[in-house]
Image (cartoon, grey):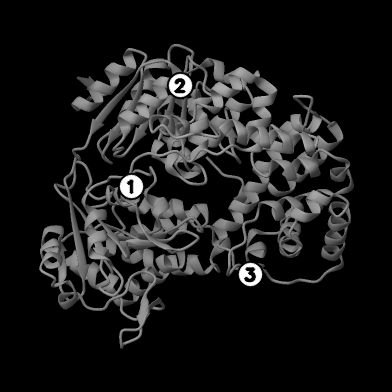
Amino acid sequence: MEYKEFILDDFQVDAIESLDKNHSVVVSAATGTGKTLIADYVINKYIGSGSKIIYTAPIKALSNQKYREFLAEYGDKVGLITGDVVINADAQILIMTTEIYRNMLVTKDEMVNDVSYVIFDEIHYINDIERGVVWEESIIFSPQHVRFLCLSATIPNAHEFADWISTIKEHSVDVVKYDKRAVPLHHHVFDSKNGLKTLDQFRKIVDNNEYDELYTDFGNNFGYKHKHRGGNKRRGNAKKKDHIELVYELQRKNLVPCMFFVFSRKACEDKAGELSRKMREGFTTPDQKSKIIRYMREHLDPEYNNLETVKLFREVLPKGIAFHHAGLLPGLKDVVEHLFNEGLISVLYATETFAVGINMPAKTVAFSSLEKYDGISFRYLNTKEYFQMAGRAGRRGIDTQGYSIALMDKRHNDPEKVLTLMTKDVEKIISQYRLTYNTALNLVNSYDQETTETILKSSFDYYLRQKQHKSVRIMASYKNMLNRLEKWGFILNGEITEKGEFAKYIYQHEILITEVFNTEAVDMLSPIEILCLLATIIYEERKNDNFVKQRSSEYKNTYLNIISVTSEMRYVDRKIDRFVLRKMIPMMTIWAHGADFMEVVEMTNLREGDVIRLIRQVVDFLRQILRATKDQHRIDKLQECMDMIYRDIVRPEF
């Protein structure tokens, strides 16, 4: 079978045949095998019918990329909706983050009635501890007529997942599995003393108890120090630059370009700088250097030349070395992605966000460590995380083989865990379902008691527990939540109040936001004070975050007025962190007053991309509050807030 001049693989044909039967389909296929072509078929099939197709992605960067791709082919029939961007919202093909689709469903957005198919890219994100519930509710709350195309790398329990969808949505859900990669992938370990070892070679070493003898001390991306006489291991600063030894080996064996995953933003930049200083000429020819420098000159705004990241880029990029992480300016990420796509980058140090959906494969993928810090402790990657990243190795139509290589550390790596991790993706899709106040309010508002119970018992968690004959207390949890909402005035006599009506449009911090913005409190705050308070609510403090302390009468008055207003409300006063408020006021105030972005960046050690993300999150919450607000005076004030901060580099360009 051919489609758009492509000869389709059998699994693509199977998926398309299921779609033609109006079935939902779960596609579990290795990275780089052409899952996106199936999504393109769905869009092409319905483009002439007038019905809508929704394409959801787990991160904004992937949403933006898909928007650009589909825009090039379908023009004004494509729209984009994320928290901070709305383009052509009435379009037939809508690209959006999964959160946006979920929010449309729970608030009964009429547009959903016209949707035929929803494409869930990277559906395995349902495993995500914090956000997985969004994918579950997107399936649970979808109307019965909607069909799903769920795309993912390997899902060991794909049939179980499909059976759940089929059970709650009462239609056929077919599973299409394809484990064969377009480019075979080989897994290796590396240390600077023994060089590259295949997994089979490594397994023999482990089986023969030669691991301690052969594998000597070397660091990973965090580095390690240990006491010489059998003392406890602890993390410190690695002195050895083993990633450089690996890069030399890759260069000798012609195994570049290499995507080098490092689980620390700072380490990405440090390693790029280390490699650049070690390799005076780098990987590029004089002609390639000229192309890179010319492209940088054309696409890097001179305004940001004094940023340390830009200075480092100017050093490393002409050598074919780069780094990429979420803390970079959007424009810098675009430059790196373009140069990588053009084959001008030989070694790219990147955090794992680069592996999510963005179609930029390399010949080799390397790992500075198989451990990462997850916000609580250091842990090994799970197999799905590993194969999501390793799967980027091997470029279809270019490479005959792909290579995944992990740096080893004898003092810290558990060889058995390493072998298990690198052998096969065994992580099942599980449920992370939890009930939120927003969901509870929308259930009370839109459904009777019987339907509510059916919905609450439709979660993947409930389905799995029932299969295992385990008791589930979801209804008790729901009733407890309703009692709290009634106590706080969001529900009265089984119906939502004015406060509840407002809160159903607020998707995070819903109680706190409503207590401030659906009361007279908002009338007593100036636009600047509103922005500072919102930033305080949204900002998630990290251990080493720093902000310049600036004293001025304006900042002091802003702080005192916000505190005088919020201290009158017990719940709000308890939730507002006054230390964070002091930090947010100078930064948000000067940006709202029209300062250049560089002035804002100089007030904090936050990465430039993180500053932009924080301001865009404030924009996202302003949109939610605007939708929930009915008072015209408040709407005008909130719109003024939006106009003050949604500008220049914060406002994305397409």
Residues at marks 3 and 2, CA–CA distance in whole angstroms: 48 Å
Give how far across and how far down residue 464 sits, in percent: 41, 33
- Residue at the location (81% across, 38% down)? 518
- Residue at the location (38% across, 33% down)? 468
* Foreground residue among 386 and 489: 489
Residue beneath disc 1 = 384
Give how far across and how far down residue 443 sits, in percent: 64, 26
Horizontal side, residue 570 vs residue 376: left or right? right
Quick one: label 2, few (<14), some, or many (20+) residues within 10 Å? some
Asked if residue 473 is positioned above or below residue 25 in the image, the reply reads below
Quick one: label 3, few (<14), some, or many (20+) residues within 10 Å? few
Q: Which mark is residue 168?
A: 2
Between marks 3 and 1 in the image, the one whose residue lies nearer the viewer:
1
- Residue at the location (79% across, 38% down)? 487
* Foreground residue among 102 and 346: 102
Residues at marks 3 and 1, CA–CA distance in whole angstroms: 34 Å
- Identify the image quadrant of residue 481: top right
The first of marks 3 and 2 along the sequence is: 2
Give how far across and how far down residue 240 sits, in percent: 31, 79
Amino acid bearing label 3? Asn
Between marks 1 and 2 in the image, the one whose residue lies nearer the viewer:
2
Residue beneath disc 3 = 546
The first of marks 3 and 1 along the sequence is: 1
Name the quarter where the N terminus is drawn: top left
* Foreground residue among 93 and 238: 238
Toward the bottom, the furthest residue is 229
Give how far across and how far down residue 606 sits, in percent: 59, 64
Amino acid bearing label 2? Ile
Q: Which mark is residue 499?
A: none
* Foreground residue among 103 and 571: 571
Query: What secondary structure is marked by label 3?
Result: loop
Quick one: label 1, few (<14), some, or many (20+) residues within 10 Å? many
